[in-house]
Image: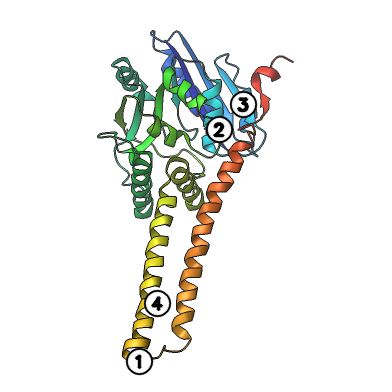
């Protein structure tokens, strides 16, 4: 069995060595693993994350450093493309993901699951806002991606294991503005899960904030659904119907009842309402046009600034 572990890292100099050494120690005890390697993808950290990994003198460990900060999902895509294992394990660099549940994940894979999620047993140690955002976030993902996953609460998902066939499918998707999570849910395949106790972060703080989560949610909705365009059409029709009905009401009031139009205030309200809706709709259309332009440029998703493979040749 050939396994590759992909670990995206951004400013994780305090955690990355312990994380890599732990996964090496756990997999080293298994006799059924013929080949194992760790691929750390440094998302252009401004600390010495890359140098620390490069100084782990183990042939099973390599590191890619992206030429600019591109986000954890792009870093994952870079690592997944580099991986050649029958199984690809994607996990975080901060030590919160427990690799001890790898045995159970492999067991699920041996039973036919092409994707195995590791779900934390609880999110009680997080704030109410974080738990609420996660629930809404993944509900939107399921809805827009039209996923039929049963019994898998992705709001508790942290890391995952991918079969080679799933890796090939992900690598065949060339779009830029998307996420690995979104692609996995959208791709389908047989999926299963295991549960584990998520550990506390050893040092430092999470790089995820409200802004990054909101940006990812927007990317997922636009990447996997035409729902905003459909909503725009429905809202536009309803607004047009209201405008027509109000105009008809004014005409009937003026001709039949003899009621005069009440000043300019109502007219301004209608203009502002319609103007605001039009601006919102044009913004949505503009987002889609920008994404279409971005895709047609066919720019590479990432560039490798340094590689331990190349560095060690010198």
Residue at (46, 89) in percent of width and height? 263
143 relative position to 36: left or right: left
Q: Is residue 226 above or below residue 107?
A: below
Q: Which residue is mark 1?
A: 258
Which colouring convention does the figure follow? rainbow
Q: Is residue 183 above or below residue 275?
A: above
Mark number, residue 192: none
Foreground mark, 3 or 1, reads: 1
- Provide the secondary structure element on which disc 4 rests: helix
- Provide the secondary structure element on which disc 1 rests: loop
Q: Which residue is mark 4?
A: 247
Give whichever of 86, 229 is nearer the camera.
229
Horizontal and vertical percent position of residue 142: 34, 41
Mark number, residue 75: 2
Tag 4: Cα neighbours inside 10 Å, few (<14), some, or many (≥20)? Answer: few
CB under 8 Å between discs 3 and 1: no
- Provide the secondary structure element on which disc 2 rests: helix
Q: Which residue is mark 3?
A: 64
- Mark 2 / mark 1, whichever is N-terminal: 2
Foreground mark, 2 or 1, reads: 1
- Spatial CA distance of label 2 from label 4 is 55 Å
Tag 1: Cα neighbours inside 10 Å, few (<14), some, or many (≥20)? Answer: few
């Amino acid at each position: 069995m050939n396994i590759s572990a992909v670990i995206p890292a951004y400013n994780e100099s305090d955690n990355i060595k312990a994380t890599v050494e732990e996964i090496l120690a756990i997999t080293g005890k298994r006799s059924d693993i013929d080949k194992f390697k760790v691929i750390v993808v440094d998302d252009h950290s401004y600390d010495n994350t890359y140098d620390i990994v490069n100084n782990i003198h183990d042939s099973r460990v390599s590191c890619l450093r992206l030429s600019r900060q591109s986000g954890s999902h792009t870093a994952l895509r870079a690592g997944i493309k580099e991986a050649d294992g029958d199984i690809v394990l994607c996990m975080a660099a901060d030590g919160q993901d427990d690799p001890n549940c790898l045995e159970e994940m492999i067991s699920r894979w041996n039973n036919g699951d092409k994707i195995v999620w590791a779900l934390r047993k609880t999110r009680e140690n997080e704030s109410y806002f974080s738990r609420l955002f996660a629930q809404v976030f993944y509900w939107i993902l399921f809805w827009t991606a039209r996923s039929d996953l049963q019994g898998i609460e992705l709001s508790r998902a942290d890391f995952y294991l991918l079969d080679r066939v799933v890796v090939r499918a992900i690598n065949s998707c060339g779009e830029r503005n998307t996420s690995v999570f979104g692609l996995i849910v959208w791709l389908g395949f047989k999926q299963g899960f295991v549960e584990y106790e998520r550990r506390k972060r050893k040092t430092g703080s999470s790089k995820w904030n409200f802004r990054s989560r909101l940006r990812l949610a927007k990317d997922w909705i636009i990447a996997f659904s035409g729902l905003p365009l459909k909503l725009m059409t429905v809202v536009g029709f309803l607004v047009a119907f209201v405008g027509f009905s109000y105009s008809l009401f004014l005409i009937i009031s003026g001709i039949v009842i003899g009621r005069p139009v009440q000043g300019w205030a109502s007219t301004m309200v209608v203009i502002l309402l319609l103007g605001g809706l039009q601006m919102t709709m044009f913004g949505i259309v503009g987002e889609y046009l920008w994404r279409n332009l971005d895709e047609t440029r066919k720019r590479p998703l990432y560039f490798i600034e340094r590689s331990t493979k190349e560095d060690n040749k010198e």
